Amino acid sequence: IRHLLEQCDRPQGVQVFADIDNGFGGLAEKYLLSLRDEYPKTPVLVWGLGSSTAGYSAEKKQRNAINVSFGSAKMSQHSSVFVPLMGFSPKSLFSQNEPIP
């Protein structure tokens, strides 16, 4: 990324797509911190990607929620704009007791 940004006279911004619901959220946060240190005035738009939790056990849903919370908090600190995009599943609209039409 540094090589590409050095070729620009005045970069308008950087877009970053990063997972926020697993261990790669921490890696992306460190990357954003490094990017901010080198280019403090360049706007950074972060798309935080998360997967659907439909079909997960209660324990896995809880772990996923904690990861999303930490990832969102950390990435929003180091970005100009943070947009969380969570996966969607039609199954998540219905409770487990209702049949899916």
Image: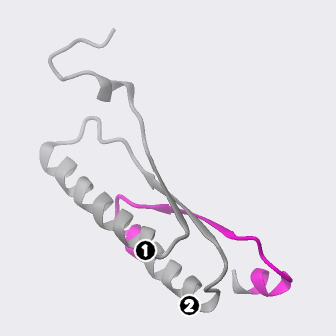
Tell me the quarter of the picture where residue 42 sits.
bottom right
Q: How many marks?
A: 2
The kind of secondary structure element at disc 1 is helix
Q: Quadrant of residue 44?
A: bottom right
Front residue of 59 and 20 = 20
Query: Earlier along the polypeptide chain: callout 2 or callout 1?
Result: 2
Q: Which mark is residue 8?
A: none
* Left or right: residue 60 compared with residue 6: left
Where is 36 relative to 96, above or below?
below
Residue 4 painted magenta: yes
x and y percentages locating residue 83 in the rendered image: 50, 55
Where residue 16 appears, as percent x and y from the top left, is: 59, 66
**Is residue 2 left or right of 62 when viewed as pictured?**
right
Instruction: Please give the label number shown on residue 37.
Output: 2
Q: Which residues are magenta?
A: 3-27
Please state the horizontal and vertical placement of residue 59, each as a whole percent of the image.
13, 50
Dot 2: within a 10 Å radius of its alpha carbon, few (fewer than 14), some, or many (20 or more) residues? few
User: In 3D space, how far apart are the residues under numbered discs 2 and 1 (Cα atoms)?
Assistant: 13 Å
The structure residue drawn at horizontal position 70% and vertical position 70%, both measured from the top left corner, is 13
Q: At 67% from the left edge and 70% from the top edge, which residue is drawn?
A: 14
Horizontal arrangement in the rendering, residue 46 relative to residue 96 (left or right): right
- Circle 1: is it few (<14), some (14-19), or many (20+) Cα within 10 Å? few
Amino acid type of disc 1?
Gln
Determine the residue positioned at 64% across, 86% down: 39
Q: Amino acid at mark 2?
A: Asp
> Depth check: 70 or 82 in front?
82
Screen quadrant of the N terminus: bottom right
The residue that mark 1 highlights is 77
Dots 2, 1 in contact, CB < 8 A: no
